[in-house]
Amino acid sequence: MKVPFVDLQHEYQGIKDEIDVAIAGVLNRSDYVLGKPVRDFEPAFADYCEAAHAVGVDSGYSALELILRAYGIGPGDEVITAANTFIATALAISNCGARPVLVDVDPATYNLDPTLLESAITPATRAIMPVHLYGQPADMDAILAIAQKHGLRVIEDACQAHGARYKGRRAGSLGDAAAFSFYPSKNLGAYGDGGMVVTNDTAVAEQVRILRNVGQSAKYQHQVKGFNHRLDSMQAAVLCVKLPYLDAGNAWRREAADRYNELLDDTAVTIPAAADWAEHVYHLYIIQVDNREQLQAHLTEAGIATGIHYPIPIHLQPAYADLGHKPGDFPVTEQLAQRILSLPMYPGITPEAIDYTARTINNFIAE
Ligand SMILES: *Cc1c(COP(=O)(O)O)cnc(C)c1O
């Protein structure tokens, strides 16, 4: 049996006809840039996130960067984020000219540990950027309380958390503004790159709208030095078709996670902890084991594809040598990097594939 890490074909085969119609619509209208699909998808995604505004951009990275720029964050400023995240979170901060200040994560949820936040705040701190990593919201109430006390913005990196809920509220509606990615393998994925800024802050939505489109408020009227970070009409057309299927995809992921949790031998495997306030959407299903490299090689041999998210923490990457960190600075993140393994997880994964994966892991550990 072969088990892929993700399968983008399962969903496509089910919606092929709708996708064809949507793409033909763009071709027939030729509204390739900021066309009807973008204007349709933005309010649909804002509604889905239970937020007031959504502004389409060309990637999750751009969404993060444009939020920071809209808040005027740049050189001399510090933005606090989780040490355990994808590199794009830190890149958005440093490419604005600000300094990413890393904080270690909670060993149970793998998300920014709010108890470590206050000691990372300095007079230069402008914002906190929690990441809802792997599909589980960070502990937002604790983070928001500290932000409020210190007058800081809270910018959610929701790039792995489309549809997740925190105490009943949607990821993306919890802070000042949020960034989503529509990279193809995300819970809501385009057929190329795409992203979205979601916010209840009207001024920030307006500013991002200007910044994404060469800094113009009206045609050829340039208020600020902007960028070209627009969401493509073709991708927006695909996303319009796919959005109504997002909840079903997330439900499939949750069922798959429940089945893994039930089957895996939890005396030797640490299964993901879902906090009681979280509706986890399992962008990734992460386990921890002692002998990760051997287990991964064994699974590869058995035809089961896995991943590691992420093998080298940001503070130990050559690109961030300028932050001046050393091994041991973020012990939880570093230990996770040694022990985590991402198992196959996608809408369409079969109970048989999960059973085979869990059985292969349990047998390897029992040997
Ligand atoms: C995917 C991702 C991003 C960046 O999204 P892109 O669309 O690939 O630019 C940022 N942060 C996190 C946590 C992500 O998983």
Image (cartoon, rainbow, N blue to C red):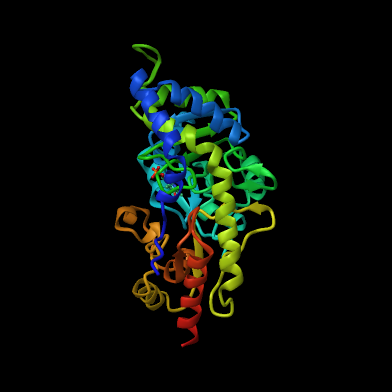
Point 39% across, 33% down: residue:
20
Point 38% across, 78% down: residue:
294
Regarding residue 231, the answer to whether it shows in the image is no
Point 46% across, 50% down: residue:
101
- 239 lies left or right of 171: left
Residue extending farthest to the left is 318
Image height of 331 relative to 281, above or below: below
Residue extending farthest to the bottom is 367
Point 45% across, 26% down: residue:
38
Regarding residue 141, the answer to whether it shows in the image is yes
- 265 lies left or right of 182: right
Asked which quadrant contains residue 181, the reply is: top left
Judge by depth and name the residue closer to the eye, 148 or 231: 231
Image height of 96 relative to 255, above or below: above
Q: Position of residue 16 (x, y in %)?
A: 42, 39
Judge by depth and name the residue closer to the eye, 313 or 182: 182
Q: Position of residue 28 (x, y in %)?
A: 35, 20
Q: Position of residue 96 (x, y in %)?
A: 38, 37
Q: Position of residue 7 (x, y in %)?
A: 41, 54
State how many labels appear: 0
Question: The N terminus lies in which quarter of the figure?
Answer: bottom left
Image height of 56 relative to 343, above or below: above
Asked which quadrant contains residue 22, the reply is: top left
